[in-house]
Image: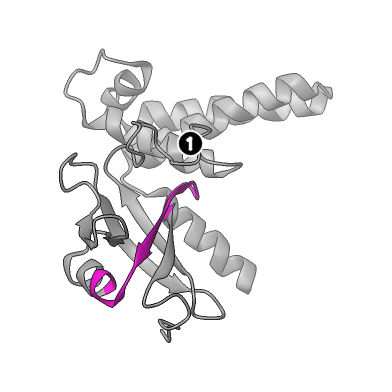
Amino acid sequence: MKLDWDKMDGLIPAIVQHVDTGEVRMLGYMNREALDATNASGKVTFWSRSRRELWRKGATSGDTLELVDIRADCDGDALLVLARPTGPTCHLGTSSCFGEQGAPGVGFLGELADVISERAAKADAQASYTARLLAEGVKRSAQKVGEEGVETALAATAGDKQETASEAADLLYHLLVLLEATDVPLDDVLDVLRDRHKA
């Protein structure tokens, strides 16, 4: 990765994006030392222009950014940092420094998959519908996917757009629960779709 460090006096803007949802979380700046620290630790680290020192995101709050990948733009003067946040990113307590809209478009599926995974990790099976469904096992989740698939098809055949959207939402939700129950990450499904698209 060739970077143009001279363009902004040794600093390069780094846009942080949630790798699973596509949500833009923040903008920070990196110098060579911050980039090296990020790559070495796996925790996203920036150069503070006001304090004139390195700062690791979440060092005090615990809301870190786990590094997944770093990409340079075509001119080598900006970075896209793909990360998995462990909590809110903004110092105001919101998930993003650009507001609390959440993941855009289909990125919400990644956000929903994360919520389902969090609920699966809780010991109390009665804490939510998701937890109860997961506690009933793979067969129950699979049955719900089948039921919702049929209901989606029937709504579409009837030409009811609102009902089709509602049933399709149920289908997508239950499919994500089934993926969680079978320990198949949504990313694996997306990788298959990408590979098929390339072919």
Residue to which mark 1 is pinned: 175
Foreground pick, 160 / 29: 29
Q: Secondary structure at mark 1?
A: helix
> Could you say where residue 93 lies in the image, as x and y percent from the top left?
33, 31
Percent of width and height locating residue 122: 20, 26
Toward the bottom, the furthest residue is 2
Q: Is residue 30 above or below residue 130?
A: below
Query: Please, what is the three-letter code of the amino acid marked with disc 1?
Result: Leu
Give the residue displayed 63% in from the left and 30% down from the top. Answer: 168
Instruction: State whether residue 26 appears in this view.
Output: yes
> Which residue is pictured at 79% across the width and 24% down the height?
161
Q: Is residue 112 left or right of residue 184?
A: right
The question of residue 93 being in magenta is answered with: no
Whole-percent x and y of residue 127?
A: 27, 14
Pointer 1: residues within 10 angstroms few (<14), some, or many (20+)?
many
Q: Nearer the viewer, residue 61 or 109?
A: 61
Residue at position x 49%, y 80% in the image: 76
Residue 151 visible in image:
no
Where does the N terminus fall, quadrant-wise? bottom left
Q: Would you place residue 155 above or below residue 116 in this image?
A: above
Colour convention: one colour
| Residue bounds of the magenta highlight | 17-35
Q: Is residue 130 above or below residue 191?
A: above
